[in-house]
Image (cartoon, rainbow, N blue to C red):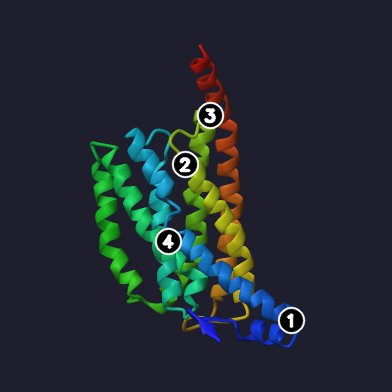
């Protein structure tokens, strides 16, 4: 029995016989359900950050470079997974994250007027290269090298924001809700990636296993998002107390 591509036959078969589903069967089902849950949640994960910027009309404390690198990382990861044969539940959130990241960067450019020539050149370069990579029309060896590098891209995407928070002792307009959802999603994706690793899907030379790559990216995501969350909790507390005191006066 399959519903939306999710196979329930193993679990339902065991339950109909009055037995509890076997561990492998249950873990595979939970992994698939969590995978689709992440995809659903990621349709709005960056919405709180977008709304916060629009509400305050400011990108105070936000590192544009961090969000630009994230955009590049999402594009590479999505392209590789699309052409690698993984099930949609294992990477579907990347499509929604890419769209939201595009909107977010565009808004940040708008609120950082005047936009420098460097920013315009970066945007034009991205628009020129992204369609080719997403279509998979590049050398297979280069494709694998890009995918291998996207974990470093995501790692370095967080560093400018983390450093800026530390330097300013403030997280500015950084959204707690968005970062909380990112952290939770990375935690869940670690579990689903471990389950998906049984599928040894590779592109051409098979030097990189997609399942392991997704797992590595998820572990790095957990670490960096945990740092950002802790910074928000540490640096925003004094501000909230000051606001409370001001209101009581």
Let me know if residue 3 appears in the view: yes
Distance Cα–Cα, label 3 vs label 4: 28 Å
Identify the disc placed on residue 33: none
Q: Position of residue 65 (x, y in %)?
A: 40, 46
Identify the disc placed on residue 169: 3
- From the viewer's perspective, is 84 left or right of 22? left
Distance Cα–Cα, label 1 vs label 3: 50 Å
Q: Quadrant of residue 18?
A: bottom right
- From the viewer's perspective, is 197 left or right of 57? right
Mark 1 secondary-structure assignment: loop
Q: Earlier in the sequence, mark 1 or mark 3?
A: 1
Q: Earlier in the sequence, mark 1 or mark 2?
A: 1
Distance Cα–Cα, label 1 vs label 4: 35 Å
Which residue corresponds to mark 2?
175
Contact between marks 1 and 3 (CB within 8 A): the answer is no
Which residue corresponds to mark 4?
74
């Amino acid at each position: 029995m399959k519903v939306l591509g999710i196979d329930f036959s193993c679990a339902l078969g065991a339950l109909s016989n009055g037995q509890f589903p076997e561990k492998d069967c249950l873990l595979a089902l939970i992994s698939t359900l969590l995978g689709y849950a992440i995809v659903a949640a990621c349709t709005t994960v960056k919405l709180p950050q977008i709304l916060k910027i629009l509400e305050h009309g400011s990108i105070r404390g936000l590192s544009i470079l961090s969000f630009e690198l994230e955009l590049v990382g999402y594009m590479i990861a999505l392209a590789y997974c699309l052409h690698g044969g993984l099930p949609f539940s294992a990477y579907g959130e990347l499509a929604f994250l890419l769209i939201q990241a595009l909107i977010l960067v565009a808004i940040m450019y708008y609120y950082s007027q005047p936009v420098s020539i460097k920013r315009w050149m970066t945007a034009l370069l991205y628009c020129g290269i992204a369609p080719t990579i997403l279509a998979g029309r590049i050398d297979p060896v280069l494709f694998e090298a890009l995918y291998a590098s996207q974990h470093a891209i995501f790692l370095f995407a967080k560093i400018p924001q983390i450093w800026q928070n530390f330097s300013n002792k403030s997280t500015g307009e950084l959204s707690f809700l968005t970062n909380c959802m990112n952290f939770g999603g990375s935690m869940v994706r670690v579990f689903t990636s471990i389950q998906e690793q049984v599928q040894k899907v590779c592109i051409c030379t098979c030097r990189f296993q997609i399942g392991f790559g997704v797992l590595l990216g998820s572990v790095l995501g957990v670490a960096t998002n945990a740092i950002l969350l802790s910074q928000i909790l540490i640096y925003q507390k004094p501000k909230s107390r000051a606001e409370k005191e001001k209101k009581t006066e």
